[in-house]
Amino acid sequence: MSLDLVVTDARLPGRASPVSIGIRAGRVAEIAPAIVCDAPRLPAGGRLAIAGFVDSHVHLDKACLLGRCGHDHGDLKAAIAAVSALKRDFTEDDVYARGARCLDRAIGFGTTHMRAHVEVDPRAGLRSFEALRRLKRDYAWAIELQLCAFPQEGLTNDPGCDPLLVEALDGGADLLGGCPYTDANPEAQLDRLFDLARAYDVDLDLHLDFDLDPSWGHLEDVCRRAEAYGRGGRVTIGHATKLSAMTPNAFERAARRLSDAGVAVTALPATDLYLNGRDRPFDTPRGVTRVHELERRGVLCSVATNNVMNPFTPFGDLSLMRMANLYANVAQVGPDGFPACLDLVTAGPARLMNLADYGIAVGRQADVVVLDAPDAETAIAEIALPVFGLKRGRLSFERPAPTLMPPPG
Ligand SMILES: [Zn+2]
């Protein structure tokens, strides 16, 4: 059987010598040291090939708001209030345009899958959700979006929010999110979300906590429900920054609990760094949970983008390679741990999002992103840019290297 395309001279993570990747009908048909055939060839030049970055936690609906509200909001509560005031005026086209700007960048940085959290409540209505549904459809040629509908400002205390969430689930939301720390009754919110997740058979991805006081929290409440509802492997907690402030013993206990219950953890370094520790003007804590250490203890983990150019995070370019480098720097991970950091933005979130078709392997969907580095260590150290990417075997972007122009002679 003939091939449609062959990516030649590509290095796969953990494999010593370069390979050729043969693609047929959008899938990987063959991986071999060399493939002889007439199909067009795309040379990877001995560079590292991955199945694309997987951004497991992004807020497209409230990205790129800085021109409208500034950024100096002091803390998390003020940032939520600033966006709450703006989102009544969000139109579907406005959300679409800001989300499209983000997706254009994410695709150019090699992201092939993304879980987008989208606020559904009486202020946003379903307008943001509808915009994201359109984005999901219009960008499917390059990136697969999972839509995670969630109540940012509480569920039990926000009349009218619950039926909208149900409407979003009926209208194609892929999963449910939550934010118990903004709810007047966090336990009741968790009960309702777990009920809905079971009824609709969808995953849950919760903004769990966002402070540095480990003396209380909802981690155990989530683990207990994950077990009681039989949802192990289908529940994620995001931020979970209390974990960054725990003593080593408490951290070990929490890691065991999360691993046993099958609850995954996502760190969002940009926002966690920007908003945590505002009450500590000197010797400020990092406030980023050490997910590579949780991963070593059997907890499924990811590092993701979260917010971009808004009151929560006045930074952002949607580059997960940059985010993995930031994480390694902040978590004091050295070169030995760089491959694990690359996993936190690729294979880790793919498992967390239950993407069964992810990975460069025979039979899988041919998503291939070639990075300008020979291996994971160099890629993380140098924030290697992608050179080109394929989605389902079709070239979806190219990123040519800069051309230097020294004076003649
Ligand atoms: Zn978030």
Image: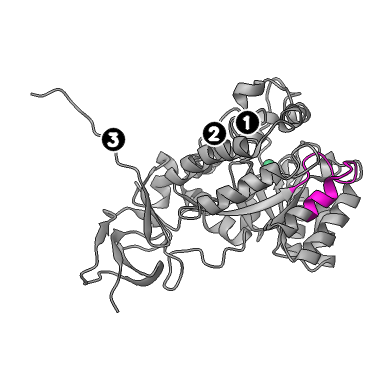
Q: Nearer the viewer, residue 401 or 164?
A: 164
Q: Nearer the viewer, residue 360 or 101?
A: 101
Dividing the image into 4 quarters, which one contains the N terminus? bottom left
Instruction: Answer yes or no: is residue 218 visible.
Output: no
Q: Find residue 229 and report its horizontal and vertical position in percent.
A: 82, 66
Q: Is residue 154 above or below residue 205?
A: above
Question: To which residue does mark 3 refer?
Answer: 402
192 left or right, relative to 99: right
Q: Secondary structure at mark 3?
A: loop
Residue at 78 percent of width and 30 percent of height: 77
Residue at 79 percent of width and 55 percent of height: 166
**Amino acid, disc 2:** Gly
Within the displayed image, which quadrant is ligand 1 positioned in? top right
Q: Secondary structure at mark 2?
A: loop
Neighbour class for label 1 at 10 Å: few (<14), some, many (≥20)? many
Badge 2 vs badge 1, beta-carbon distance below 8 Å: yes
Q: Is residue 134 above or below residue 368?
A: above
Q: Is residue 247 magenta?
A: no
Q: Which mark is residue 62?
A: none
Q: Which mark is residue 316?
A: 2
Badge 2 vs badge 3, beta-carbon distance below 8 Å: no
Neighbour class for label 2 at 10 Å: few (<14), some, many (≥20)? many
Callout 2: CB less than 8 Å from ligand 1: no
Q: Nearer the viewer, residue 222 or 284?
A: 222
Q: Find residue 375 and report its horizontal and vertical position in percent.
A: 38, 52
Q: Which span of residues is magenta-colored?
A: 150-166
Among all residues in the image, which is located at the extreme bottom?
A: 1
136 left or right, relative to 158: left
Question: To which residue does mark 1 refer?
Answer: 313
